[in-house]
Image (cartoon, rainbow, N blue to C red):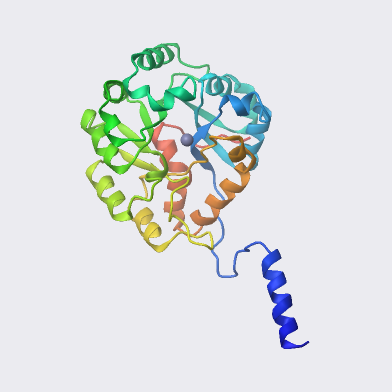
Amino acid sequence: MRRWMIKFLGALVSAAMPVLPSAAEPAAYAGPLFDAHLHYNVEAAQGPHPLDDVLGRMQRSGVRAIVANSRPNDGSKALAAASEATRRAGVTVVPFVRLYRHRDDYTNWFRDPSIEAMVRTELAAGTAAGPYRGLGEFHLYESANANGPVARSLMQLAEQRDLVVLAHVDDAAIGLLFAHAPRARLIWAHTGIGGTPVERVRALLRAHPTLMGELSYRPGLTAADGQLSPEWRALLTEFPKRFLIGSDTWINARWQAYEQLMAEARRWLGGLDAKTAGLIAWGNGARLFGLGEPRQP
Ligand SMILES: [Zn+2]
């Protein structure tokens, strides 16, 4: 075959082929997963993703426990109430109170006393799977809003009642939230979705011993080959007990990609030593909420 022909065919092949693991790539992590950032919002629950569908996706992905939160809270309560179906799927539901009744609440919850009243009512009622274990996910698009009266009050409530907080905020807001409640247990959703420098993440982990990072959508976490970037491999290895994985099923497209998202996580987890991978995949979430061994489907 002529050289140009080989080149031409080579280009065709590389355009059509997905990126496959190279022979040198480590085996993917094969143990249980704890999905620490899952939403079961109304668009999914009352649309194309009824309970059987989402539990099937979790089961096929080897997800054995989830932080369930939803807008409104009905989705989480439906998951918590489906004890037979979740048992069959081998999924333990850890319910959180979402701070949003509808989309308008995203940008005003931190100063809206009716949100705090809703949260207290939900906490008092609990769920069919037991008491709520956390608050969130909430967003702060401007870090200064961490000083809103309801944000302060809910951080203090979380600290008093040992509820875990799931917060989608920037690095400046992490310090402001901890100033209200220094011993609160806080999961930083995405660990800096705007690309907070790794050095800054490291400094925050050192400054706040109860801070943990959830890794969905984290820029720079993985390189083009789907494996961890060197700086993130170093950070996760230095702090093996401080990170969690998550799917962030905030829109239905994330549900459609659920199994792929979990496979991607398994792929980069495989690049860590087995102990660190097991902690980030499952052990840290299980410890945070006092779960035992994963359920078996
Ligand atoms: Zn989210």
Residue 98 picture location, percent across and down: 45, 24
Residue 198 picture location, percent across and down: 33, 54
Q: Is residue 73 above or below residue 66?
A: above
- In-front residue for pair 180/293: 180
Q: Residue 242: which quarter of the image?
A: top left
Q: Is residue 141 above or below residue 46?
A: below
Quarter of the figure that contains the N terminus: bottom right
Taking the image as shown, residue 70 lies to the left or right of residue 284, namely right
Judged from this view, the residue extending furthest toward the bottom is 2
- In-front residue for pair 234/118: 118
Rendered residue at 52%/42% (across/down): 33
Rendered residue at 42%/27% (across/down): 106
Q: Is residue 170 visible?
A: yes
Quarter of the figure that contains the C terminus: top right
Q: Is residue 104 above or below residue 269?
A: above
Q: Residue 132: which quarter of the image?
A: top left
- In-front residue for pair 29/95: 95
Q: Residue 125: which quarter of the image?
A: top left
Taking the image as shown, residue 9 lies to the left or right of residue 220, namely right
Rendered residue at 53%/16% (across/down): 128
Q: Is residue 184 above or below residue 234?
A: above
Give the total of numbered labels.
0
Residue 36 picture location, percent across and down: 47, 37
- In-front residue for pair 148/222: 148
Judged from this view, the residue extending furthest toward the right is 1
